[in-house]
Image (cartoon, helix red, strand yellow):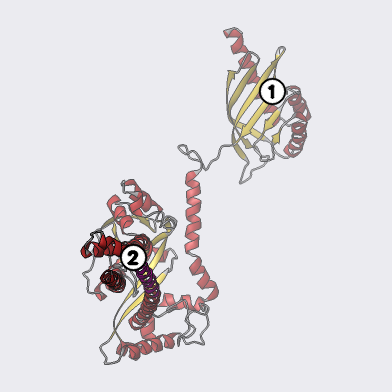
Amino acid sequence: MGETMERVWLDEAIELAKALWRAYVLEPTEEGGRFIFDSLFQSDFSLIGTGKHEMYPNLPAFMAGLERDQEEARDITFEILDDYYEARPLDERCCIVFGTLWVREKPSKPKPLLVEMDTRFSMVFRREGDRWLLAHLHHSTPNVDQRRDEYYPKTVTEQANAALAYSKTLERRAEMEAEAPDRLAQAESFNWDMAAALQDAAPELWAETVGAWAQVSTYAVPDMTYDPLVAAAEATGADPAALRLDDLDSVRATHLTVVSLSDFNDTRALQGQEPVTLEAGTCALANNMEIVEPLARAVLEAVPTVTIAGTDYALAGPLYDTQLEDNAMAATAMVIVAPDEAVEALKEAGCIPDMQYLNVMYADNGKTASENDAALGDIVAALQPRDMGGFEKGTQGADDPYASLLWPVTRILTANEMLSQSAGLRLMITYLALYIGFVFLISTAAILAIQQLSQASDSTPRYRILWKLGCDRGMIYRSLLAQVLVYFLVPLGLAVCHSVCAIGVLSDSLLDAIGVSSAGPIAMAAALTLVIYGGYMLVTYLAARGIVKGSLQQG
């Protein structure tokens, strides 16, 4: 095909494409339908339209769909606002025409909303004799949610997920509004101040019992998770194994936990620590859990931006290890310390506290710890007596003298109770460990001792022969000592290797996370093993030596 003829044929294809669109869009009549039918490559035609159902693999399927479309089109008229066509040859007998088609409804009378379609198309034509026939048409509408530089509609997906996450953070408020509106109203009347509500319920008992207090209210940030912070930490080049992300796989999807600067400083003051100040436009990070500390420090090194209620704050160091609640373990994990106005913005957006802790120091009133604990229970019972309904938390706190409500108090944990529980748990674990360990240790040492003494007794004739052959007593006794050491120390070495692996795993996954040191128990276990196991080994050697010595004297 010559250059001139090729251009002429391509122009003919473009004109046919325009005529087909006019017949389909502007003139959906029987005559237009016949023109469309006559212009199709009837032995092998296919079409993909803009509707999900418009997938026509052959001509009969398309004609059935075209008949339905023309019936529906009788009630509407379109006009072409803009169109664009470009043709390219595929081979000597085929070409493709592609472009855009922007159409809008042309109403007979004014309407507030009009049907409008900004579409794209590609049409494959086949040359038959002196004319083009349409073999395939693909007509589509672009995804308006997909931005120019996106491979898929990423932004709108992220926005939708953020909206869902935001709505989920408001579920707690909706739950309270539906099931306990009186509790929500009370909380908001006191501005979520637990101490003010308790003091108002029993002012005299509160003044007598409570010397100092600090409340911590944590909020879940609706529009941001920890994922950007983790990504920033990874971008610093920190060792992934050191960040422990495999152990912290759920942290990425967790919403940021935020406390206000005033709550944070009140808690620090209660612990005798200096207050923290924040520069304008910054926030801080608090963490005292060892398992999370490498990640927290990597996050601070990256200096990421935290978004709270639509405002950006730069995360600034240092890392604070303040404990926010009365707990037997380290319990502050990657908590954002934000300016008070940021938390107020969250409250104005409809967020309510995710968790609230009221840390209380008893007054110097001459009462015992148990008496003060009982007085604190009476203060809570004055505000929420047991027969008071509204948002009960199941059987939790069933033995408490007060109703276990969502606000203000669900659970009381006093230092006296915590020490008692911790001591009881530690005593039980220590007893079980010592009992089981002692039984196994004694059993192993006794079996080895019996085996060595029996072997020494059976070997007395051999020792006499060695003595007669010229071996002195010292050499025989050293051989006996080496044998006893091997039999006792090889099992001990295997046990030590097993213990090192087990304690290493426990330290990484549990003990370090809760801030418990394993050095003391290891030292105690080593001393106990040295005394008992070493004592059995020494006694076994001396007894075996006595057996051999008696045999040599008889010989």
SS of the residue under disc 2: helix
Image: 255 above or below 95: below
The location of residue 273, given as percent across then percent down, is 22, 71
Amino acid at circle 1: Leu
Q: Which mark is residue 134?
A: 1
Disc nearer the start of the sequence (2/1): 1
Magenta stretch in the rendered image: 439-461
The residue at which mark 2 appears reads as: 461
Residue 228: x and y, percent? Answer: 38, 51
Is 213 in the magenta?
no
* Label 2: how many Cα within 10 Å (few below 14, some 14–19, many 20+): some
Q: Which quadrant of the figure contains the N terminus?
A: top right
Residue under the image location 47 percent in, 87 percent down: 385
Instruction: Name the image quarter holding residue 471.
Output: bottom left
Q: Secondary structure at mark 1?
A: strand
Q: Is residue 530 left or right of residue 30?
A: left
